[in-house]
Image (tube, rainbow, N blue to C red):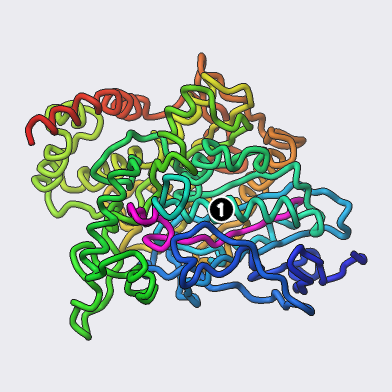
Amino acid sequence: MQNGDLRVKTEAGVIEGIRELNGAVRAFKGVPYAKPPLGALRWRPPQAVEPWIGIRRTNSFGPRCIQFPRLKGTLLYFPPEPESEDCLYLNVWTPSKSAEERLPVMVWYHGGAWFSGSASQPLFYGETLASRGAVVVTVNYRLGRLGFLAHPDLTRESGRGASGNYGIMDQIASLQWVQRNIAAFGGNPDCVTVFGQSAGAYAASFLMASRHAKGMIHRAIAQSGAAFGPLVPSTGAGDSIQPLHEAEKLGVEFVRNMGATSIDELRERTPQQVQLAPKAGRLSDRAADEPILPPRGWGALDTGYPIVDGYVVPDMIHAVFSRGEQNDIPILTGSNTHERGVAVQPPDSLDEYLRTWRGQFGDWFEDFLAAYGANSIAEAKETGGRAIGDKLFSWQNWTWVRSQAKTGTAKIFYYRFARPAPLPLGGYSENPTGEPWTLHGAEIPYVFGSFAARDWAWQPADHALSEVISAYWINFARNGDPNGQGLPAWPAFDVNDPAVLMIRSKDDIRSAPVPDRNRLDFWDRFHASLPKVMADLENRE
């Protein structure tokens, strides 16, 4: 490869990219890493890309997976993009001048609750992060029912006794592509960090637990999320994970609701019919002028989430870690100080708040109130958001660092991000308490330096903090340790003396006791009781 050449030879053929940041970075967008999963390839593992002749221009993003729209005005709003079932594309940003540089590689898996999002959202543009010393790769993967439908027929035809988790197989296929091709972009295939936020952070924990990712990932960064919840048969969403046989039952129900008689017949339906159908009926049952609304909350799709399939995901993640069977690699993980997810629906009254949580926790309701009590609707909106955020995100990362510390040998770095994003007032950002919130996803523009993605009142202090955070992330990708010259010291996590790096501003980064321990301890106790809770529920039925 000639110095500054925009043409790179991949295993499938030559691609031609573009220059960004005044030529400091080369970008290759819409690079196929697997064959389009269309027709008979729907609900099958990703297949190898078919080679092409000549030069393939990679100057625009590939389509994202078909999905529900996201609401405007949120940090994680995903603007309209081209969509298709043909969505297995990735993007590469590299600052390298030659293929011999062997820079650290950072592979990003986007969030979106497993049913929305894309690798080409402006928040994830990789040119600024790459310019600071890494090859950055962002990946589209199959979502929702197109990515995670399980069914007995699919299990039988797989030849491995498993179905579902096609979206995670896509992620593994992207890592295989990186292993075979990234050196041509100046990246080091022996120094690959997976990183992601929300569902992307959950993905990092799945990849650490999967034997299929062994040797292809060397570090993991997980921002707000992990899959350390219990095995719960009723849903595979949120903080829990579903077993294969339960997911198969929901798949059978979905096929029936769609008016199909087999998986092959369902493969003949349009991807929109499959992906956007409501839980209880077919898309064709809707009135012609009735809008297709995004689902409300985790579990809204039932059939569109990762499962314990015994193949890609061998067991509950906490069980894999408790046995010390995970890919033992350094991890950098943490959460934000108010992890209120975009799917959280605030209560309309204090009575509704108390009634909802009493119904969820039963005998544990008083313990819940000790951690998340409220005496007014304003407090209910505040503590309810904290409860959901702790359950889905903060407790997951807290459990991950302790689990890795007990059975792994690699270093662990644990953080809590505490700088509120300057969101406009109203809607999702409305805060009844008046206290600034550091919401779910608030750290993303600081990692990527992607402030231009949101026309908000960013300050010089935000850009200064971004340089610190991206330096931490790149140091970790390079060395498995975020520390470096000129940066505040970040001590490795010690399970016997647990602390967290509190990140508030460039001048306010320090190690501190883990905050909100009473809330995290509640979830420890509650999850430990779940086997008894589930047994009681089954006995009542």
Q: Residue at x 54, y 49 (%)?
A: 196
Residue type beneath disc 1: Gln
Q: Residue at x 54, y 27 (%)?
A: 325
Please provide the residue range marked out in magenta.
Answer: 133-154
- Residue 92 is situated, as x and y percent measured from the top left of the image, at 69, 62
Q: Residue at x 31, y 57 (%)?
A: 430
Which quadrant is the N terminus positioned in? bottom right
- Could you say which quadrant of the image residue 48 lies in? bottom right
- Outermost residue to the top: 496
Which quadrant is the C terminus positioned in? top left
- Residue 197 is situated, as x and y percent measured from the top left of the image, at 50, 49
From the viewer's perspective, tell me whether residue 4 is left or right of residue 68: right
Whether residue 468 appears in this view of the structure is yes
Magenta-colored stretch includes residue 144: yes
Tell me the residue that label 1 is attached to: 171
| Of the pair 215 and 100, the residue shown nearer to us | 215
- Residue 206 is situated, as x and y percent measured from the top left of the image, at 49, 41
Determine whether 335 is above or below 14 in the image: above
- Residue 204 is situated, as x and y percent measured from the top left of the image, at 53, 43
| Of the pair 67 and 166, the residue shown nearer to us | 166
Magenta-colored stretch includes residue 492: no
Q: Helix, strand, or loop for circle 1? A: helix
From the viewer's perspective, tell me whether residue 438 is left or right of residue 501: left
| Of the pair 385 and 153, the residue shown nearer to us | 153
